[in-house]
Image (spheres, rainbow, N blue to C red):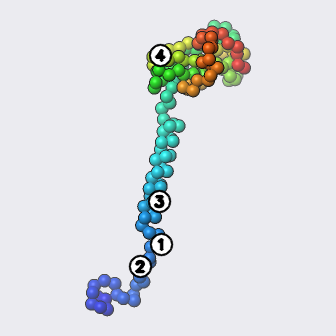
Amino acid sequence: MTSNGAPGRPAGRYRRAPARRFPRWVGALTGVAVLMVGLWASVTAYQNWGSPPVSADHTSFDAPDDHSLRISFDVMRDDPSRSAVCVLRARSADGDESGRREVLIPPGESPARHTSTVLTSKPPIMGEVFGCSHDVPEYLTRGSSVEPDSEVPPSG
């Protein structure tokens, strides 16, 4: 019992509860801000690490001579009506990149198999698809007569 007869804490025995430092709306606003930052981080992470809009897997490669490598690869696109570009590269026995080639992938079916020849500066031992994108450079699209399997000089 308290000094006035009502149940509760005895007067003078305990301190008063401290007053709030910030109003409740400040805590609510902080919570909303934290949720917005978390949502932004989630969307950014998905865009950067989610499934890419264009991807490719090399299916085979063949070295017909010491200065070229034929690479076959399958291209998968989320929007087959858009052009894409894939970068192919060849490696030599010492691990160096001995050739590189950008290949224009015209609009079409998805998945689609393509084959291209990469000219090399050293005898190649393996070929790979370095990556693909919908961001096609202008020099590949402006009236270029380079077909996916035509000869281009080696890069390395």
Q: Please state the horizontal and vertical placement of residue 96, each as a whole percent of the image.
A: 69, 23
Q: Secondary structure at mark 4?
A: loop
Q: Which residue is mark 3?
A: 30
The residue sitting at 54% across, 22% down in the picture is 84
Discs 1, 2 touching: Cβ within 8 Å: no
Q: Please state the horizontal and vertical placement of residue 90, each as a whole percent of the image.
A: 64, 19
Q: Residues within 10 Å of mark 4 (few under 14, many from 20)?
A: few
For the residue marked with disc 3, what is the amino acid? Answer: Thr
Q: Secondary structure at mark 3?
A: helix
* CA separation in Å, label 4 and label 2: 72 Å
Q: Which label's residue is closer to the chain start, 4 or 3? A: 3
Q: Quadrant of the C terminus?
A: top right
Q: Which label's residue is closer to the chain start, 3 or 2? A: 2
The residue sitting at 60% across, 11% down in the picture is 147
Q: Please state the horizontal and vertical placement of residue 13, each as a whole percent of the image.
A: 39, 87
* CA separation in Å, label 1 and label 2: 12 Å
Q: Which residue is mark 2?
A: 17
* CA separation in Å, label 4 and label 3: 49 Å
Q: Residues within 10 Å of mark 3 (few under 14, many from 20)?
A: few
Q: Which residue is mark 4?
A: 108
* CA separation in Å, label 1 and label 4: 64 Å
Foreground disc of the pair 3, 2: 3
* CA separation in Å, label 3 and label 2: 24 Å
Q: Is residue 18 above or below residue 64?
A: below
Instruction: Residue at the far top: name it.
Output: 64
**Numbered badge on residue 21:** 1
Q: Secondary structure at mark 2?
A: loop
The residue sitting at 53% across, 14% down in the picture is 114
44 relative position to 142: left or right: left
For the residue marked with disc 1, what is the amino acid? Answer: Arg
Foreground disc of the pair 1, 2: 1
Q: Which label's residue is closer to the chain start, 1 or 3? A: 1
